Amino acid sequence: MEIKADYERLIEKYVRSLEWLHSDFSEMDDLIKPIMGIRNWDDSTCVKFGNKNLVVSVDGPYSKRLVMKSALIHATTDVVVKGGKPLFALDTLIGIKEEVKQMAESLKRQALAMQIPILGGNTLFEEVEPRCSLTVIGELVLEKPIRDSTARKGDFLVLMGEPIWGTQEERIPKAKKLFETWFEVLKKVEIHAAKDVTKGGLISTLYEISEKSDIKFELEEEIPFPMTRNLDNFLTFVAEKDYKALLRICKEKGCEVHKIGFVR
């Protein structure tokens, strides 16, 4: 994938700068043999737990500004896009008491609206910049998690869902529609690969999938979103023969959808 010089900084910050962690922690997979672990370096981890496969992700620390809008949604996309139905979340909060209280109240509103209960966590009152980290646990609804390294030649690149921007009141219905549509799509369409468009925007997401799948993309000349802004929607890779079914489901659910390219 050809990269413009002004995109290099973002890719370095959000992708390449973390590669040493992948290497340093890779031996951890040997201790538990996860379905999807540190060696896969994906959005979430997937492990067998009893007779279920759990999809787990931790995200943050988020600034108070994002917590007051959609931090729980932002953290949950990493689980949902891999095929995990969210079960519950845990939070970690830090800051002065008044700001921690405001963040907790916002998280409660998000949890009730999204039906993702926050069942515990850790809280520290301290005179520092208020921050929050979230762990989301979900149950895999597919036989295998959807990886970001398994795009195939000829796949269409499809963005599902409108960007989750705006106030909290605007973001929650957008997220609910995306999640509902996504789980309906998973019942009827084989998704070859997928990733939520977050840190570093589309350019970092495309770069990471290109490198991990060892493929190249042909992108549309006009993409209706900025390439470097977090969108929080889903970039999916689907065979041409399945694209019509995905498009039909999105239209039935009123979920925004855009074909932005194909795999060479």
Image (cartoon, grey):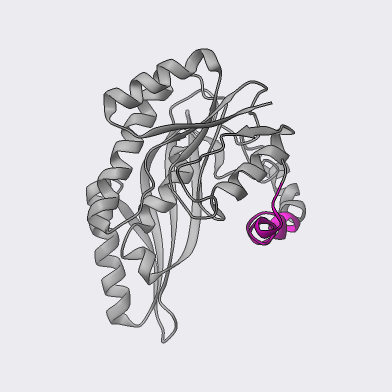
Position above or below: 15 against 32? below
Find residue 211 and report its horizontal and vertical position in percent. 72, 40
Magenta stretch: dominant secondary structure: helix
On the rendered structure, is 116 left or right of 2? left
On the rendered structure, is 240 left or right of 66? right
Image quadrant holding the N terminus, namely top right
Q: Which residues are magenta?
A: 3-21
Is 4 in the magenta?
Answer: yes
Which residue, as the protein is rendered here, is positioned at the far top? 241
Residue positioned 39% across, 56% down in the render: 90
Residue positioned 31% across, 81% down in the render: 97
Between residues 236 and 116, which one lies in front from this camera angle? 236
Q: Quadrant of residue 178?
A: top left
Residue positioned 45% across, 42% down in the render: 224
Between residues 83 and 261, which one lies in front from this camera angle? 261
Which residue, as the protein is rendered here, is positioned at the far front? 221
On the rendered structure, is 243 left or right of 39? left
Image quadrant holding the C terminus, namely top right
Between residues 115 and 68, which one lies in front from this camera angle? 68
Find residue 189 and report its horizontal and vertical position in percent. 46, 18
Residue positioned 27% across, 73% down in the render: 101
Position above or below: 178 against 125? above
Which residue, as the protein is rendered here, is positioned at the far bottom? 127
Find residue 39 and report its horizontal and vertical position in percent. 70, 43
Q: Quadrant of residue 77?
A: top left
Position above or below: 241 against 120? above
Q: Count of labels shown?
A: 0
